[in-house]
Amino acid sequence: MENTLEPTPSQTVGPFYGYALPFPGGEEIVPPGEPGAVVVRGTVFDGAGTPVPDAIIEVWQPGPDGSLRGAPGSLRRDPVTGGVLGRTGLDFTGFGRAATDADGHWYVRTLPPGPHREGAAPHLSVCVFARGLLHHLYTRVYLPEDAEALAADPLLAALPPQRRDTLIAGPERPGVYRFDLWLQGGAGEETVFLEFA
Amino acid sequence: MNALQPPTQADIDREIAEHEGSRPGAAHPARDYAPYRSSVLRHPRQRLVVVEDPEAVELTGPAFGVTDVTALDNDLTRRHQGEPLGERITVTGRVLDRSGRPVTGQLVEIWQANASGRYAHQRDDHPAPLDPNFTGVGRCLTDAEGRYSFTTIKPGAYPWRNHTNAWRPAHIHFSLFGQAFTQRLVTQMYFPGDPLFPYDPILQSVTERPARERLVAEYAHDLSVPEWSLGYRWDIVLDGPAATWMEEGR
């Protein structure tokens, strides 16, 4: 369909989203102890290498079966008190939201995404907001295991090796991957950010 | 300009004027818009990589439902024992995609300062009173026509430290989800006729006037309720591609 309307411009999330956007359990797409759960964790850095304590990271991903029909209920509320109940832990919502802490650190606990199409290199889609960032940034977190799928991925294939590596999470220990986000840096350092045509 | 001194409003005004109209046709701010000083170390220097053919992951997005909001979540004036101070307002509008289709059943979140211009946030040390009857956070789901609606109070202007004597025009922060993750939007809604507009590098980061005007709500007398509240209308258009198969989807 044709674009007939002009978009509403983006504005920065600012410094004071902390009582509005983060929600208890936002990082726990699956509960601790869930069989097969993995953690993707990292630090957000600015161009001076200083951790960014006021960024917020959102993750959207397929389920382990590759399904893109995430269940609702990420922010489940108690209709009696209005308080937060959180996810049931029974349905996979595929959505996580993590504010960085005072050290600029964030994590999500989730299930590894499945391929959403035959041969696809599974990845998490990531959206980054921060004070100082006037328009959010998208990137992808690829998990490192499936070398064949990674080699066939059209986005990764189009990137020079040093830039490509910024999109592949580093295995830290079993079940824990590191994915630092560099908002600004040299070509081998700054995270690859995406624009969608 | 002395690097040790914070910039003056005149310095910022000069920079704003240099950027004004510099990106014809652009809707979104440039991430390297230096008059907003916090952007300087927080924008990419490498070119964004254009994805011509987004993956299905990006062309879909998270789902929210009736369990994610409660009936009172869109009324920011009824969250405490008493009534908040300030001018009671309703803000309503439609969330559309760029082809004019309503974005239905999606999450809208807002947050704002109180009537005195103070956020209920520990890091806001502006010496204006907190209001024990106002937190300033709300959420709702868009209806079948893409409509959202909030009852709140008009936020106050507040000072910040971008430069000497920097004041933000009154605004409400909005967070929106489309049918696709690529349509995600976080933005700010402003109130018509605010005299602080020309001085504010965050609003002026949208360097094209028509785009900037799309951030300003319209006072809508038909939405005002006699003896009760003033009405504002603000429609939101989400950018970015989405999967067309979602039309028959959820």
Image (cartoon, rainbow, N blue to C red):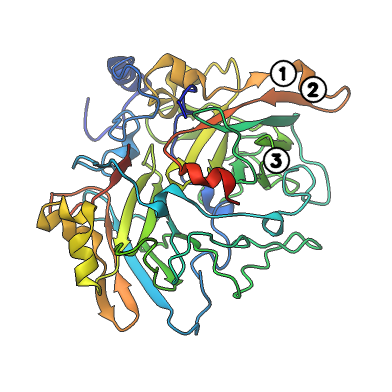
Question: Could you tell whether B166 is left or right of B75 in the image?
Answer: left
Q: Are the residues tagged 2 and 1 within 8 Å (C-beta)?
A: yes
Secondary structure category for the residue under label 3: loop
Residue depicted at x 35% and y 45%: A137
Q: Earlier in the sequence, mark 1 or mark 3?
A: 3
Mark whose residue sits in front, 1 or 3? 3
Q: Residues within 10 Å of mark 2 (few under 14, many from 20)?
A: some
**Whole-percent x, y for residue B205 in the image:** 38, 26
Secondary structure category for the residue under label 2: loop
Secondary structure category for the residue under label 1: loop
Q: What separation in Å lies between label 2 and label 3 (alpha carbons)?
A: 21 Å
- Where is B229 relative to B208, above or below? below
Residue depicted at x 61% and y 46%: B106
Q: Which mark is residue B220?
A: 1
Give the amino acid type for the residue marked by disc 1 in the picture: Ala
Name the image quarter holding the N terminus of chain B.
top left
**Whole-percent x, y for residue B28 in the image:** 39, 29
Task: Please give the chain letter of the residue carrying mark 3.
Answer: B
**Whole-percent x, y for residue B220 in the image:** 72, 18
Task: Please give the chain letter of the residue carrying mark 2.
Answer: B
Give the amino acid type for the residue marked by disc 2 in the picture: Ser
Q: Earlier in the sequence, mark 2 or mark 3?
A: 3
- Frontmost residue, B198 versus A97: A97
Q: Which mark is residue B143?
A: 3
Q: What separation in Å lies between label 1 and label 3 (alpha carbons)?
A: 20 Å
Q: Which residue is mark 2?
A: B224
